[in-house]
Structures are given as C-alpha cells and as structure tokens.
Amino acid sequence: MTEAVLAQGTVSTREERRAYWQAQVEQWQRSGLSKQAYCREHGLTAASLYRWCAKLDDGKKAKPGFIPLRLSGVVANGFALELTLGDGRVVRIGSDADPVWVAQLVRELERAC
C-alpha cells in the first residue's frame, strides 16, 4: 500500500490509516535512513511521515507525573539527590540544599506537569 493508495481513499478507516502509518514509521526507524531518504525510496511525502511520527509519538507519551520516592539518607558525591531526565540531562541537588528551596522546586515541577 502506498501513500497514493491512501490518497485515493481505498483505505477508508481511521484504524487502517493508523496501522499503515505505524508500519511506515517502524520501517523508517529500522531503516537507518533519514526521513527524506526513506520517503524518496518508498514514494511518500516527507510532510506526511513527519506528521505521523509526531502523531504516533504523542499517543505513546504518558502524562508526566511524580512517583513516590523513599530516600535512604545516603549521600553520594556530595549530592543528596540526582535525577536523570529522559533526554540525558541530570539534575543534582546537594546535601546542603535549603529544604524550603527544594520544596519550592518540587511545587514548580508539579505545576509544570
């Protein structure tokens, strides 16, 4: 099935379109090609692939939230708390951090989520 077939309306249900594009996104991810190169090779428009990548990714994302933690009281490398974010960034809070400031930080993070 090609994007042209989709444009002609032969794939009529939302589920079929979603399944088609899910397969295209997965094949692109395994291919090692750029989105543009993959689209050229498979007769797709880059705009459609970009749109479906974003659409399918949004459906996978869980709403950010907090999970309960129990602190052990162990301090490593002078930091009482170290958080590694999904994109590899690290937030470190020193053992000497003001508890009022930490509480304010947590409130701001909760509000942002």
Image (cartoon, helix red, strand yellow):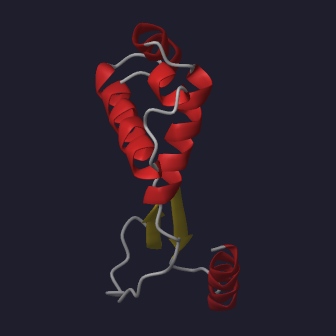
Q: Is residue 58 visible?
A: yes
Find residue 103 and report its image quarter. Answer: bottom right
Instruction: Out of 37 and 43, give the one closest to the viewer.
Output: 43
Would you identify the image quadrant in which residue 75 lies?
bottom left
At 48% from the left and 9% from the top, the residue drawn is 40
Q: Is residue 111 shown left or right of residue 50?
A: right
Residue 88 at least partly seen: no
Closest to the observer: 111 or 91?
111
Point 63% across, 81% down: residue: 110
Name the residue located 57 percent from the left edge and 29 percent from the top edge: 48
In the figure, 56 relative to 34: above or below?
Answer: below
Image coords of residue 72 (percent x, y): 31, 87
Residue 24 location (% of width, % of height): 37, 30
Please name whichever residue, 94 or 44, is drawn nearer the observer in this view of the structure: 44
In the rendered view, tell whether residue 65 sits above or below residue 23.
below
Give the left or right position of residue 51, taking residue 86 as reference.
right
Which image quadrant: the N terminus? top left
Q: How many marks?
A: 0
> In the shown orientation, is residue 83 left or right of residue 46?
left
List x then y, in percent, for residue 49: 52, 29
Q: Is residue 32 above or below residue 51?
A: above
Q: Is residue 76 left or right of residue 59?
A: left
| Residue found at x 43% / y 45% | 18
Give how far across and how far down residue 70 sits, in percent.
35, 89
Q: Quadrant of residue 84?
A: bottom left
* Figure quadrant of the C terminus: bottom right
